[in-house]
Image (cartoon, rainbow, N blue to C red):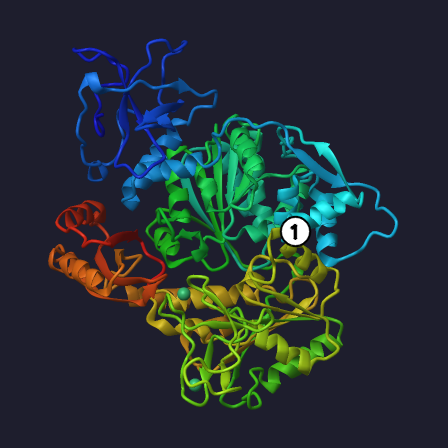
Amino acid sequence: MRVGPPAAGLLKQPPTGRPRVAVLLPLPFPGPFDYAAPPDLPAPPLQPGDIVTVPLGRRTETGVVWDPERNLPPEFTPPPMKSVADGRLKPVIARLDQPPLPASLRRFVDWVAAYTLSPPGLVLAMALRTGTAAQAAPALGWAVADPPPGLRDTPARRRVLDIATHDGPLTAAELARRAGVGTSVVRGLADAGALRGVTMTPRPAFVRPDPDHCPPALDGEQAESARALRALAAEGGFSVTLLEGVTGSGKTEIYMEAIAACLARGKQVMVLLPEIALSSQWTGRFARRFGAEPALWHSDLGPRLRRVTWHAVADGTARVVVGARSALFLPFAELGLIIVDEEHETAFKQEDGVTYHARDMAVVRARMDHAPVVLVSATPSLETLANVGAGRYRHLVLTARHGGATMPEVRTIDMRAHPPERGLFLSPVLTEAIRQAIGRGEQGMLFLNRRGYAPLTLCRTCGHRLQCPNCTAWLVEHRARQILTCHHCGYQEATPPACPECHAESSLTPIGPGVERITEEARATFPDARILVMASDTLPGPAATADAVARIARREIDLVIGTQIVAKGWHFPHLTLVGVVDADLGLGGGDLRAAERTVQLLHQVAGRAGRAEAPGTVLLQSYTPDHPVMLALVSGDFESFMRQEAEQRRPGFWPPFGRLAALIVSADTPEAADATARALGQAAPRGDSLQVLGPAPAPLAILRGRHRRRLLLRTRREVAVQPLLRQWLDRVTPERGARIDIDIDPVSFL
Ligand SMILES: [Zn+2]
Ligand SMILES: [Zn+2]
């Protein structure tokens, strides 16, 4: 088996014998393996992109015939691998009856692997995920039947029936998963006659969206921006455009015009959203504009729907796909446009497995498919603004809210001057404002980006703090479920009645608020208000989130209390007051982007207020009302704020003016972690244009029982960090039980 560049040429007859073919397997090998082309394969001969089965040891694996030339910049070229003699080559078993992986996607896989220093097979795995499994027999789906008399009504049953009504028929497993219930609930409804079984058609109909279905009436700067985007999409070719506009300025309507132009040109569209919970509202808007729903792609899709969608994208049946970051790796037959909505969101950074930033990789994918990409945000990232400043990206700006709505007024509440009562967390200034909003028949929202009841539990007798046994982290109390849980590893235990250390009873005290504790306070303060909590652990999935959003829109709710899920692009027309419980929360920790991120998040939260006729007010509870972040939020002058941010990062070559790569050592024992980290430190590259920080214990020094150390490589922008890192890693052998993970362009510094 021979790997790496450049192979002797695909299917070229080597002097000694059999034709070779390189096959990339979705496994963590450094490159493709050579196989012998099967002698009896029906025509045409194997081509790059063909999906094949091959022997690997005693197993049979599915892989993709890979290109002999990898087409990568020289600094990316992967290391050569050992060659296998002709006589030992094993033949390809079969070619699967699947659409081949397009050339642009193969190049993208190679590029992402080289950029992130990941085995290309692991990147390929994302492109193949469940897409290539053989066709299964038609499944039994469940649809709603006429409700039988006397049917027992429970919230769980109602959720299942709701989903079956709107999205049915679905398999029992899919129904149960989306409703967040056990399959026994579905079975019970079927037994009671409320659901009827139907044979599922092997693929859902992907209705073609009609670009002329219902075009919006746009004028002024909106019409101008829409025209510019339409022209780019109609013309095709690679370009990057930042569409920047205040919340509520109609950015979605405008980029949908680019989608219309792309569809009219007969090309496909990829839309990336940071959070798939947003997709239900987005899908509704899309359907009103185009008269058909887009295809969805996210981790919550059942295996059947994933397979069907993958094929529909590959054969061009699905014209528009909206999805989470993994949609980047779909086999588009003719991709003509990429949209990245909320491009500043850190959720676009994948932190597990292959670590990549979906926004940045979307730009790469667009280049490979010769397509325009539009990055959309109310508060663009400094990275994107720097690219605009350097003339690499185009820039379209919307300054006014759509339909005459005004921007909300933002004020800080100085918590030193207006403190809450002892043991409470809401200032009287804020509670009074909420009371008035509810009294006027409007809605209020309280935002706190922290799940659970309290972030820390402490024994008043001995001072013991309840800590996760697997991580350097406090256990978070979730009072409704009577558990303590670790938000890093998922460890759970029942809330103990006494201190586990000194056994004092009733001595455990919650410190600080989580969203549950704020809810408790709000229920006591506003006993008549209809309160809804929105947090990722109280809403089991997109369907439940959509349901919550619909209830808010129907004015069944007076006060919404939520974590960052409420900050997303929701449109709540009756919401006029937003209270941020702890505006200082994100500023601690010394993260490079802490200030930028806090401004982006809080501005987005603020943007939920006053989106219709009634003006909105946003109140920020802060102990540091003079902090530049608070001043920027109050004045709404983000341009100056971002300019200041840029000036702070420029001199030290911090991103976006330099490059960062994190090396994370993790090991079974602290000794192995230290020894490996020390070896890395000693072998570190040196030079004027770079600096290595660390090794140092990671802030999460223990995670899931593994001991962690970090190093950070910081270089000038013009330095290619990949070859530097590769040579560095070649000089170090990790200790037994230790591992080194590389995170290029890190976002998290835990
Ligand atoms: Zn104690
Ligand atoms: Zn933990």
Q: Residue furthest front?
A: 503
**x, y (%) of residue 475?**
45, 72
Q: Which residue does the image show at 67% across and 78% down from the upper left?
A: 523
Q: Quadrant of residue 651?
A: bottom left
- How many numbered circles does the render carry? 1
Identified by mark 1, the residue type is Ala
Provide the secondary structure element on which disc 1 rests: helix
- Residue 407 seen in the current view: yes
Please determine whether, in this image, residue 426 is positioned above or below residue 276.
below
Taking the spot 57% from the left edge, 28% from the top edge, the residue there is 136
Asked whether 59 or 744 is in front, the reply is 59
| Residue 367 location (% of width, % of height) | 38, 37
Q: Where is residue 648 in the image (x, y as percent from the top left)?
A: 30, 68
The answer to whether residue 635 is left or right of residue 579 is: left
How many C-alpha atoms fall within 10 Å of the one at disc 1: few (<14), some, or many (≥20)? many
Q: Which of 367 and 664 is in front in this view?
A: 664
Q: Quadrant of the N terminus?
A: top left
Residue depicted at x 44% and y 80% = 500
Q: Does residue 750 appear in the picture of this structure?
A: no
Q: In which quarter of the image is the C terminus?
A: bottom left
Q: Which of 1 and 593 is in front in this view?
A: 1
Q: Position of residue 679 (x, y in %)?
A: 14, 58
**Occupied quadrant, residue 709:** bottom left
Residue bearing mark 1 = 179
**Which residue corresponds to the image point at 35% horizontal and 55% vertical from the top-left?**
386
Ligand 1 sits in quadrant: bottom left
